[in-house]
Image (cartoon, helix red, strand yellow):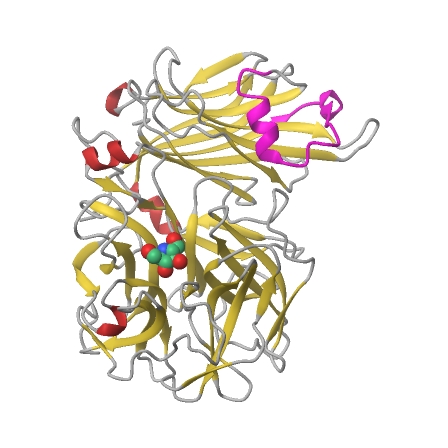
Amino acid sequence: PSVKQPYRTGFHFQPPKNWMNDPNGPMIYKGIYHLFYQWNPKGAVWGNIVWAHSTSTDLINWVPHSPAIFPSEPFDINGCWSGSVTILPNGKPVILYTGIDPKNQQVQNIAEPKDLNDPYLKEWKKSTLNPLMAPDAVNGINASSFRDPTTAWLGHDKKWRVIIGSKIHRRGLAITYTSKDFLKWEKSPEPLHYDDGSGMWECPDFFPVTRVGSNGVETSSFGGPNEVLKHVLKISLDDTKHDYYTIGTYDRVGDKFVPDHGFTMDSTALRYDYGKYYASKTFYDSANNRRVLWGWTNESSSVQDDVEKGWSGIQTIPRKIWLDRLGRQLIQWPVREVQRLRTKQVNLRNKVLKSGSRLEVYGVTAAQADVDVLFKVRDLEKADVIDPSWTDPQLICSKMNTSVKSGLGPFGLMALASKNLEEYTSVYFRIFKARQYSKKHVVVMCSDQSRSSLNEDNDKTTYGAFVNINPHQPLSLRALIDHSVVESFGGKGRACITSRVYPKLAIGKSTHLFAFNYGSQDVDVLSLSAWSMKSAQLS
Ligand code: DQQ
């Protein structure tokens, strides 16, 4: 970030210039992390898509390489779209990606490293057998809705499976293909899963999770002798531009995914992130025995602003993800390596945030910071009763902005704030009673961008999520603040909201950070730690 480029990020991944969208084929190979991503070599808007490529030893500092895959053959001459890496049993990584052919049909191709001894895998060669999967008159596949192959997994019959996002009319589906040799693929008669009425499924992801602990599970794993696995299906819904997931059981014989509690894609659905977040993808990090999630966050600024600043799109900080103890949702937390960027630290303990008050956090670079707070409310009886019709947390948050006082809340953080609060992005909680006389509570987490910038030319939509926690316990809120992004984790990773904002005043050294409580009751800040963050090497 500089005076001319106040919105460039210090530690959220972005290329030196131009348009970036989906993360592609993340993996670890010979101890090196690889990130490929959809990139336009020619400008700050979507188009001319190639697979750009960067590598890292810690998921935070990155070295750019030349694009790994770019249009060159009939099977991808109009674009090299999203795809995934599979590590074959002999350790060799291969890429499956979507190519756009001369007729603008979507087909699936394979590429493999030219030199397996190069840990940076700089050069890739495309198979002459491409395309490996293509729509034709017989298979009934919609040629303009057939893309984004997942990491493949090995079945009980030693055959590979891969799913590809698709739609037929309004039915969104994950088409399964199987193969013995990874080159000849056969379409399965039935999809792994589908949903009538949802529209196109982009960038599916399908992976096992363990029921105990937070370790990751290799994509082809069947689980240990006493280990029962669950599976997660995630899809990126083209219609809403949100990533939804559901947890369920994978029937390996029928190649069917059976969700435990259905797979809804509405305002009550499970999402990785309730802010700006799309086209995400996980990989199994064998060096650290964890599953890591990458997700793309696009701009909230106008196309004209993007063209002027010369870039568009960032990646969120990679997150470790695992199944919650009760098996009802995933937990996400920034990979611990990001903490190596923490430098100057400020700590507050046992402060009372009086009703209607703010507490400025001094001494950290508020435009580039990591903040972790623990709040505690004193009397849950003081919570207002939630209106039973309020089932959409985003609506609750946008109806009641930061200035609206309720029994318990809003309390939280004001990030990227100007000195006199002409601008701020607030991330906060409100606690409601589920019903009159009820002992059950509903915790809502909001990210309010409505006052984020004096520039009105941005999308300032307010985001919201329910946080599945018991407010008798302290409420935790972590925020990764990075110039034009606020990436927030509520309830220790039970709800995440990523926002993009473009302050005019709250930039660089003129940025402030506050804890606040505008609710009618005092709230305790059990602890607040904030760190100035060093810049990562990004290019
Ligand atoms: N982006 C890619 C597609 C994918 C979409 C093209 C999702 O493969 O479906 O850049 O953002």
* Towards the viewer: 533 or 421: 421
Provide the residue span drawn in magenta: 376-404
* Towards the viewer: 180 or 429: 180
List x then y, in percent, for residue 93. Answer: 31, 75
Q: Residue at x 56, y 62 (%)?
A: 232
Q: Position of 35 compared to 278: left or right?
A: left
Q: Residue at x 29, y 59 (%)?
A: 35
Ligand 1: quadrant of the figure: bottom left
Residue 411 placement: quadrant = top right
Picture layout, residue 453 above or below residue 184: above
List x then y, in percent, for residue 307. Answer: 21, 37
List x then y, in percent, for residue 266. Answer: 61, 46
List x then y, in percent, for residue 348. Answer: 45, 25
Quarter of the image where the N terminus is located: top left
The answer to if 193 sits in the magenta stretch is no
Q: Residue at x 34, y 38 (%)?
A: 299
